[in-house]
Image: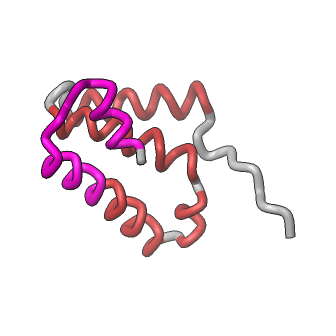
Amino acid sequence: MAPRLAAVERNYVDINEIEIMVDAAVTAVEDDARVDEASRGKIKFNFVSSYVFAHVHMGYLEELEADELMNYLNDSWDLFDEIEPAT
């Protein structure tokens, strides 16, 4: 999961806090899926978002900075452009 990767890259070793970040990422995906089930399959967006917002939890970014970064990344990388699974 992205929060674990962010923690490793930042040498953040508080296991309890890492689990809180992971739980927050899972909750965000589940909350979005309640509104739009298809959002669960938006793997690029979900990964990048949980990675970026883990940095908020660890204190490296403010929430507004993370929102601005997500806007930039989505514009640059088109995070919602997913390949549809074969049927």
| In the foreground, 20 or 46 | 20
User: Hey, which quadrant is residue 78 in on the image?
Assistant: top right
- In the rendered picture of this protein, how many numbered marks are placed on residues? 0
Assign the magenta stretch its main secondary structure.
Answer: helix
Give the farthest residue toward the right: 87
Q: What's the residue at 56%, 30% (across, down)? A: 75
Horizontal side of 73 relative to 56 (left or right) equals right
Q: What's the residue at 50%, 28% (across, down)? A: 73
Horizontal side of 30 relative to 84 (left or right) equals left
Q: What's the residue at 61%, 46% (across, down)? A: 80
Question: Over which residues does the magenta segment extend?
Answer: 2-24
Residue 17 in the magenta stretch? The answer is yes
Residue 49 in the magenta stretch? The answer is no
Tell me the colour scheme of the image.
Answer: secondary structure
Q: What's the residue at 42%, 34% (across, down)? A: 70
Q: Position of residue 2 (x, y in %)?
A: 40, 42
